Image (cartoon, rainbow, N blue to C red):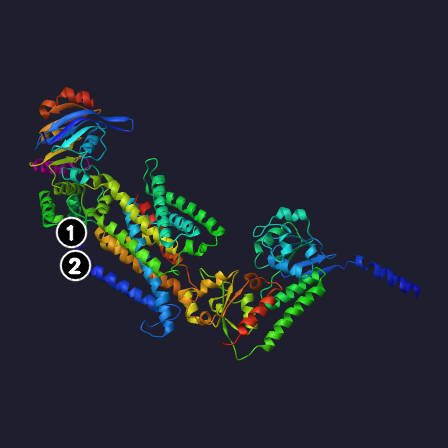
Amino acid sequence: MKKAFLFLLILLLSAPCLSIPVSVKDEDGTEFFSISAPKRIISTMPSNTEILYALGLGKRVIAVSDRCDFPPDAARKKKIGSVSLNAEEIIALNPDLIVMLGSAQRAQIEMLRKYKLPIFVIDPRSLEELASSILLLGKITRAENASRKIVWDLNNKIGLIEKARDPERRPSVFVELWHEPVITAGKGTFISDIISVCGGVNIGDKAGEGYPSFSIESLVVEDPDYIIVAGSSSSDIKKISSDRRLAKLSAVRHNRILLIDADIITRPTPRLASALGLINTFISRGHE
Amino acid sequence: MSLLEIRELSFAYKKDPVLKNISFSVEEGQFIGLLGPNGGGKTTLLRAIGALVPVKAGRVFIAKKDVSAIKRSETARLVSYVPQLSAPVPGFTVNETVLMGRTPYLKGFFQPSKRDLLAVEQAIERTGLTPVKEWEVSSLSGGQYQRVLIARALAQETPLLLLDEPTAHLDIRFQSEVLALVKSLKEKTVMASFHDISLAKKYCGRVLLLDRGSVVADGEPLKTLSGQTIRSVFSVEP
Amino acid sequence: MNNRKQTFLFITLLVLLCGSVFLSLVLGTVFLNPFDGSPLAGTVLWQVRFPRIILSGLVGAMLAVSGAVLQAVLKNDLADPYILGISSGGALGAALAIVLSLPLALISSAAFLSAFAAVLTVAFISGAGGRRDPSSLILAGVAVSSFSGAVLALMIGASDKLRSVYFWILGSFSFAGMEQIYVSAVCLFAGLFAAVRLSRQLNAFLFGEEEAKSLGVDTVSARWGLLLAASLMSGVSVAFCGVIGFVGLMVPHMVRTISGPNHQTLIPYSALGGAIFMVLADTASRCLFVPSEVPVGIITALGGAPFFIYLLVRSKRAS
């Protein structure tokens, strides 16, 4: 008995020193092996920075891209470039984990791989994929509990919305990301995903994938029930509400225009959950 | 005053003097041949008379008017110029090219008047171009096009007509044709530069010999173009 | 070209213009009957499509006439406001005025002035040293165009007031408003007036500087007047619609093939031809990838660049 107790005591005391080696395949298919939890993390994309902070790893992030602005603490971290990454700086910082975004940073990934750096690639293209990406990141950083919580929150929110929505109602929604020329979000974007979860029809899907342009004429013809403007101030809404050609749109006449922060609907981060909430509330408003 | 009066005309391209203090006068109806070695200033003299180069030293008077003091459109009614080498502008007919000669008389938006059309018709007839007047100029021979340019200058109806080496690029048979035509323009005062001394002797009533920017001889061809003069100016046997 | 043929050609061009306008009204995201009375049709037809059609016609005419004038004055068949960097220069002036929040009239004036400055720069660079061969003009145009484009890109990156690069560099009629239409109409009228009034001088220029002078043309003032007219028209066009290239190159050439180099016909027919061309190009830009919009500059370049190469090769072969 005494021996067993002693063994358990030693085990418990050494628990903090216990590093569990983990091997995870990233979304590029590369096997990433780490002996212990990464403590010197670099994030090259604002969305990944947000995820890392959401996982509670803010203290372990040692450098971020120039454009990482959320949460505010991230902006104070050391910067290593944005579109063109400062390879020298990155190498000098001796990171043990560099999180990169597959779809947007292909060239940079290839460049950094040459230096045999510890690169971990995630590439979420939909809400579902985002969930699995967050879990993957949680595994490699040993923040699994945190990751599971975030994913559970997200899925829970999605579930609640899907259950509560009226199957008869399929309002049409137009999201404007830029006004001159009008740019919207098409198929395969998070915005499109969010809108379909909320039970709406994304008009932008008709223009193809990604972020295509949309003619004023088509907007007039489509006459969406709801308009969402991605912007930062009321002047962004004014661009639509004061355009004479769009004056007859039902969304304009009934003031069904929502201003939303572009970052929370385009970045694959946990904040998509709040975007989901905002948009759902917005398009659930009945017809006046 | 004579029709054309040149007083102490000097001209230099940048620092290079081309014409040195030239003075002479030309009476109405004369056909003057301008001779001299290449680079002697023949073309520049003609250009200066036609106000095609800016003259800063000396004066050129045509019909008592100082060409540097009057508007270009007025000068164009006093002197017309047939250049040495001119590529035909494709797309224009003979008629249209000759009509260009009426430019100093045509006003802005207005269409050519009967007067203008008559001048053109007469010029074309005079130069024997009537059968080809609707032809496109790029389909003409060198000699024919030269005649078109002369017709254009005729249509300009100027008292003074300048020709720069009118026979330089023509076949021998065309040379005599063109010169005979020019000689027949008795009511005009003509000044033409020549490469070929014998042609000048044959057709001109007066010749001016220009060497290194100065007039070295001036008078009737037979008297002026003595063997000695030619030898010294051209360094050849006549 | 005799008078009967001329009248026939003129009427044909007018008919084509009306036809293009009609086609452009009818085609788009949806096929619309112009006499349809519904409010949706009303908005789309008269608020969205019609102003664009008018502006594209005016701009097309201005660019075509500018091209014809530049080709005669600069004695280069390949001259066109875009190729010579005049459009980019004009865009720079307009962008600057927009950043300073100046009213529309001043924006157009700024575009006009900077377009003219570009003309002078190009003429100076290519004429400096006495050489006047055609390629040096084009090279000067490339230099001015690249420089203006680079400065413009910097300005766009730094200022929110400027429309996107998309608009300036590729051209678009989607911002057609009544103000722009009025100013464009006035400038087209002024430019056309000058070009038609100086038609004979333009013809004389074809024969060379010396012959033009001997025919009584005041070449210096004629040249200034014509270059000012070309700068005004191309500057205003780019201020309202961004850089649209090759119209000034293609249309005069096509008109010349049909009715000859006489500017008394070339200028007015180029204006009509340019209007038709631009209205059709704008229609294509709206209809090719509905509901997206292809910038109209891409459409003119798709036709214009091969045409330019063809002309270049042909002129090299001839020389």
Q: Position of residue B74 (x, y in %)?
A: 16, 39
| Camera-side residue of C202 and A29 | C202
**Image quarter of residue C3:** bottom left
Residue under label 1: B111
Left or right: B161, with A119 as reference point: left
| Camera-side residue of A32 and C217 | C217
Confirm whether the magenta stretch covers residue A209: no
**Image quarter of residue A13:** bottom right
Tags 2 and 1 touching, CB below 8 Å: no
Of labels 2 and 1, the one closer to you? 1
Magenta stretch bounds: B167-185
Q: Position of residue B90 (x, y in %)?
A: 23, 48
| Spatial CA span between label 2 and label 1 | 16 Å
Q: Secondary structure at mark 2?
A: helix
Q: Position of residue B187 (x, y in %)?
A: 7, 37
Left or right: A87, with B102 as reference point: right
Q: Position of residue C217 (x, y in %)?
A: 21, 42
Chain ID at mark 1: B
Q: Residues within 10 Å of mark 2 (few under 14, many from 20)?
A: few
Q: Amino acid at mark 1?
A: Gln
Residue under label 2: C4
Whether callout 2 and callout 1 share a subunit is answered no
| Camera-side residue of B201 and B56 | B56
